[in-house]
Amino acid sequence: MRITRPLRFGVAIAALSIVATACGGGEEARSVSSSAEAGNLVVGIKFDQPGLGLRNPDGSFTGFDVEVAKYVAGQLGVDEGNIEFREAPSAQRETLIENGEVDMVVATYSITDTRKEKVSFAGPYFVAGQSLLVSEDNTDITGPDTLEGRTLCSVTGSTPAQNIADEYPGVQLQPYDTYSACVEALRNGTVDAVTTDDIILAGYAAQSPGQFKVVGEPFTTENYGIGLALDDTEGRNQINDAIEEMVSSGAWEQAFNETVGDSGYELPAEPTVDRY
């Protein structure tokens, strides 16, 4: 039976609609388990955090978050070569998940009640704490209580920036899009200090020996989780299983030593997954 022209046109429109949805990153959150069953995963990471999530000049990716993502993917049956890493700036992480542009985010992503209203979290897979990065010769700034009247850089949409705004109103907060931009501002004297989690700052300090130092004791507790779609309970359970296996097998400690260990940051206690 011959298809008439109007029907052919309708089929073409439908096909184009499907292609547009697939190529546009989607408008609905993705299911980790469904993507894993299809043999691939799109993972949001940071591209500019040495030791955690860093895009190298040759296009490869290194860091502890990267290794966690690879291990989890492997436990879900996805080969490393079938992982697509996509940049996930702090202010865009929830949006990337909600819009279906990524399956999960492994990007120094602190678990908070506010974020849990929009996305779900597996983990934590690491526990860090907020601290301060200053120039090597700075002796005036030793902790958050010494920041009064100072210019402090952090990242838009980040937990550290919100912590400073809430708890230290006398500090002049200068937000940037990335921590690497904050570090450059510290290097050229535009800001007095940079604040984020201690493990992130340790990576930047190690990247520029003799220029920067991390000061003071951590003044918050940050539980790093793997973000995924709000209702993806199956995916969250599978990722939690993978994190627990990574810790118990020794792969978690090995990944830490191979990525963060050289910075001098001490190996913390093993995390305990929260099965909420």
Image (cartoon, rainbow, N blue to C red):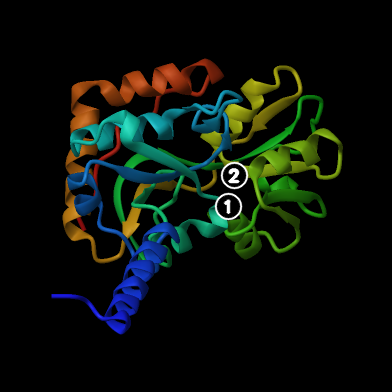
Query: Label 1: few (<14), some or many (≥20) within 10 Å?
Result: many
**Residue with the mark numbered 2:** 196
Determine whether, in the image, residue 253 is placed left or right of residue 44.
Answer: left
Between disc 1 and disc 2, whose residue precedes?
A: 1
Left or right: 185 in relation to 144:
right
Q: Residue at x 45, y 61 (%)?
A: 24
Q: Position of residue 244 (x, y in %)?
A: 20, 36
The residue under the point 52% across, 41% down is 46
Estimate the x, y position of residue 23 in percent, counting from the top left: 42, 58
Instruction: Confirm whether residue 158 shows in the render.
Output: no
Residue 7 against residue 63 in the figure, above or below: below
| Badge 2 amino acid | Thr
Q: Is residue 64 left or right of residue 79?
A: right
User: Which residue is more in the foreground, 259 or 209?
Assistant: 259
* Picture layout, residue 30 above or below residue 37: below
Q: Position of residue 36 (x, y in %)?
A: 22, 45
**Whether label 1 touches label 2, CB < 8 Å:** yes
Q: Nearer the viewer, residue 140 or 96?
A: 96
> The residue tagged with tag 2: helix, strand or loop?
strand
Amino acid type, residue under disc 1 in the picture: Pro
State the quadrant of the C terminus: bottom left
Q: Secondary structure at mark 1?
A: helix
Quadrant in the rendering for residue 173: bottom right
Quarter containing the N terminus: bottom left
Q: Determine if residue 212 is in view.
A: yes
